[in-house]
Image (cartoon, rainbow, N blue to C red):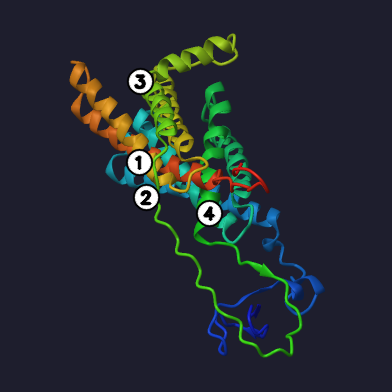
Amino acid sequence: MSMVCPECHGSYEQSLQCPSCGVRLRYNSAARKSGGATARPEGQWQNTPWGRIAIGVLLAVGLAHGLKMLCTAGLLAASEETSRTVWATIAGLVVLQALQALSLLVGGALTAAGQQRGVFLGTIVGVASGFLFMLVQQLNGEAVTDIVLYGQPVLCLVFGALGGLLGSAVWKPLPAVETSAPSSDKTPVPRIRPPSTPSAFSGPVSVVRVVCGIVVVVCGVFWPAVILNFVLDYSNGKLRLQSQLEAQMITWEIAGVFMLLGGALAGATTRNGLKQGLCVGLGAGVAIVGNYLGSPTAGLEQTILLVASVLSLTLAGGWFGGQLFPPVVARRRRFGPAL
């Protein structure tokens, strides 16, 4: 890979720092466009977007199936009777969804690593993997209900996009620079110190966005059954629940999606999405604890688990919203205040 110094315009192979200037080298896009030695060789289909998507989908589906088989093997070692019925319980469904979500995070991150459109690639991986998950369930003889048919691709889309955002944020794409012939002028170019990166928890808190996020999270936590019944009534019988277990699972998923949405709403167009999501989680946690203190039917263990889930998902949602919808740079008018 040809790397170019932005100051002396020297070209170096297999190096990250210029030996003369001491600055970080950048990727030479001119050689790539001219079809030189650094041009993409033929046959490397895995470097194309569709090739990376195919690898990410295969990795996500294969990893989820392999983790499920590993869990089944552990259950068989413990008790053969338990292994047959565990995937039909609420705990088994939660574990299965968690394994699929983890696999989508890994597959989406691998697909989007070093890519400019990481969220888009991760979204494609999530949608394709969701349909393949349902296909594998049908081939295994498992029943696929209408709720799973319409809900699972949406959840896979969300976790695939999160994986794509994570991959493009951790493994950032190399900046491409256009190089020109070095000038004969030997005047040294002054070095500009790059600005320091602000902390994720610095900056002011947008109170309006935090309050809106808390309202969204509280609605999803306290009234998921009401939301589910509204969707079922609005579908005019097209969506049906076949068991109480499925209804409970869907209400948990609705609550989790609303937690992510509340954090993303608070963190969108801000530079401190994690801080916004943390404020939403703390506010919603206070409401949940108040409900526990005022309700005699609420359990302590369930309340602690719910508060922990709210804090973790609102943090993830705040970071996701800040990365997906970054703040808009204000443009200055020639006369008048900034837009």
Left or right of 287, for residue 248: right
Is residue 332 depicted above or below 262 in this figure? Answer: below
Looking at the image, is mark 4 or mark 2 nearer the viewer?
Answer: 2
Q: Nearer the viewer, residue 67 or 45?
A: 45
**Pointer 4: residues within 10 angstroms few (<14), some, or many (20+)?**
many
Alpha-carbon distance for marks 1 and 4?
Answer: 24 Å
Q: Earlier in the sequence, mark 1 or mark 4?
A: 4
Q: Position of residue 33 (x, y in %)?
A: 79, 70
Q: Earlier in the sequence, mark 4 or mark 3?
A: 4
Alpha-carbon distance for marks 4 and 3?
Answer: 33 Å
| C-beta proximity under 8 Å, tags 3 and 1 | no
| C-beta proximity under 8 Å, tags 2 and 1 | yes
| Residue at 61%, 41% in the rendered image | 339
Q: Amino acid at mark 2?
A: Phe
Q: Amino acid at mark 1?
A: Leu
Left or right of 279, for residue 31: right
Q: Which residue is mark 2?
A: 201
Q: Earlier in the sequence, mark 3 or mark 2?
A: 2
